[in-house]
């Protein structure tokens, strides 16, 4: 009888643990296949930002002239790193950006894109001390792609 009660308790705990990890139950977990929506009002017309992310104005800068633009924006939100990385892999081509490189180094995703004579670097990381409770930060930098083009063609001018 004691053995039966112990088995029932173990079975109940196992089912509870399984249910907690199922998709659609509880919060999104790191690495879960989540599709994020594009924010409706973009800060930069051709740079997608996941819905729910906010621009940190104190740590962002924008300089636009008739000849060029330099953008360095920091966005913060509460989605999983992998979901944000997948968002940019999916959305940047829809905004006519071509992927150049992708790296994952020490928990930081670095994605590089080009469009015309501009380059765009997207960096996705956990803010602060990479604690699970810190927001995800997206650093987007847009500028002239002259250096990237020189590297690609091998020109030394």
Image (cartoon, rainbow, N blue to C red):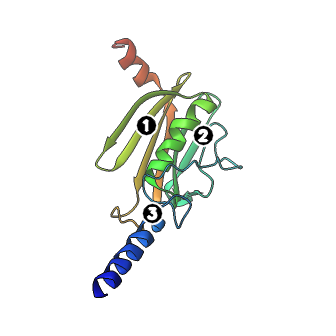
Q: Which residue is mark 1?
A: 111
Residue projecting furthest to the right: 40
Label 1 to label 3: alpha-carbon separation: 29 Å
Task: Name the spot of residue 108 as percent of width and height, x first.
Answer: 36, 48
The disc, 2 or 3, on the residue closer to the chain's N-terminal end is 3
Task: Name the spot of residue 57 as percent of width and height, x first.
Answer: 56, 58
Vertically, is 18 above or below 6? above
Q: Which residue occupies the foreground of this view, 30 or 3? A: 3
The disc, 1 or 3, on the residue closer to the chain's N-terminal end is 3
Q: Which residue occupies the foreground of this view, 1 or 95? A: 1
Which quarter of the picture shows residue 63? top right
Vertically, is 52 above or below 143? below
* Between marks 2 and 3 in the image, the one whose residue lies nearer the viewer: 3
SS for dot 3? loop
Vertically, is 5 above or below 130? below
SS for dot 2? loop
Few, some or many residues within 10 Å of mark 1 (<14, 14–19, 20+): many
* Residue 122 circle label: none
Q: Which residue is mark 2?
A: 47
Task: Name the residue rendered at 63%, 36% in the picture.
Answer: 46
The answer to whether any part of residue 139 appears in the image is no
Label 2 to label 3: alpha-carbon separation: 33 Å
| Residues at circles 1 and 2 in contact by the CB criterion of under 8 Å | no
Q: Which residue is mark 3?
A: 21
Label 1 to label 2: alpha-carbon separation: 13 Å
């Amino acid at each position: 009888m004691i053995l039966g009660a112990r088995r029932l308790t173990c079975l109940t705990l196992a089912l509870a643990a399984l249910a907690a990890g199922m998709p659609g139950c509880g919060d999104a977990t790191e690495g879960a296949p989540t599709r994020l929506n594009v924010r409706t009002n973009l800060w930069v017309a051709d740079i997608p930002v996941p819905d729910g992310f906010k621009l940190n104005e104190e740590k962002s800068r924008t300089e636009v002239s008739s000849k060029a633009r330099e953008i360095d924006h920091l966005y913060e939100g509460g989605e999983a790193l992998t979901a944000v990385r997948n968002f940019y892999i999916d959305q940047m081509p829809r905004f006519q950006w071509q992927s150049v490189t992708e790296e994952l180094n020490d928990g930081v995703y670095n994605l590089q894109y080009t469009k015309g004579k501009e380059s765009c670097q997207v960096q996705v990381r956990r803010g602060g001390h990479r604690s699970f409770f810190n927001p995800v930060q997206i650093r987007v930098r847009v500028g002239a792609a002259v250096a990237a083009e020189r590297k690609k063609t091998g020109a030394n001018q």
